[in-house]
Amino acid sequence: MKNSYKVFFLYKSGSLSIKKNINIIVKVIILMDQIMVNNSVIEIFVGDLSNTEYDAVVIPTNSRLLPSGDLRCKILRKAGTQVQVECNRIINKISQVAVGDSVMTSGGNYTHYLIHANGPRLGQVKEGKNLMQATWNSLKLADEKGLNSVVFPPISQEMRGFTTNFCAKAMLIAIIKYLNEKNKNLKNVSICVEIQPDLEIFENTLNELIS
């Protein structure tokens, strides 16, 4: 049975309107560059992920949790060698991180926790599903740890060949669904992009998903 989907828009002007759709029940309040989904904030902003302050920071990874890509290498350097030691221990136990899976380590010298998400590469099967799964699993790890805030980059954008549009749609679908259906502890889920055009793509995609 399909459920009603009620979305309440509170615009900057203060006007209020109501729209209906299907699939899930969720209340959304738009406040400036943020929205509220079932008492949790989704925020999208331009910035440097390595200079953010959240309980957990999600970074892209490969199946062996090795340094690769500018963003991952930059954050691992800031976190210190202990994080890679933890990554190596994880690989010794599980052999590899499957596409769509995520694992958590300490944040070393950088943050409380790092979540290493293995997103898909262009050309792999079930690309969208795996990107949504990597996002979902990252949220689940943070939530089950009792954390209140987590920040993502556009997973699978850097070195994985996907457009920002693809990343935005898959990630935001997973985030909205998780906050609506499973969330217990997360109060803030943010996405940090590097350039203004990417911000506009994520914002437009979010507006499309909730309209």
Image (cartoon, rainbow, N blue to C red):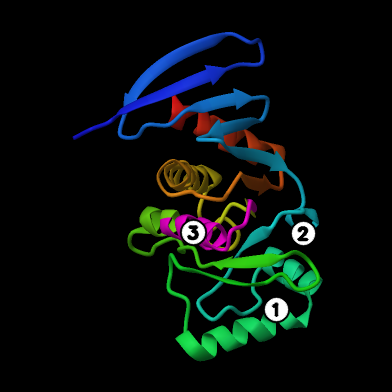
Secondary structure type for disc 2: helix
Q: Is residue 180 left or right of residue 40?
A: left
Residue 91 or residue 193, whichever sits in front: 91
Identify the amino acid type marked 3.
Lys
**Whole-number angstrom distance, CA of label 1 to CA of label 2:** 15 Å
Which mark, residue 83? 1
Which mark, residue 50? 2
Q: Which residue is rendered at x = 38% and y = 64% of the image?
A: 124
Q: Nearer the viewer, mark 1 or mark 3?
A: 3
Q: Is residue 36 left or right of residue 4?
A: right
- Residue 83 versus residue 8 in the image, above or below: below
Toward the bottom, the furthest residue is 92
- Residue 203 versus residue 49 in the image, above or below: above
Residue 31 or residue 100, whichever sits in front: 31
Residue under label 3, please give it: 140
Residue segment shown in magenta: 133-150
- Which SS does the magenta portion mostly show? helix
Identify the amino acid type marked 1.
Val
Mark 1 / mark 2, whichever is N-terminal: 2
| Quarter where residue 203 is shown | top right
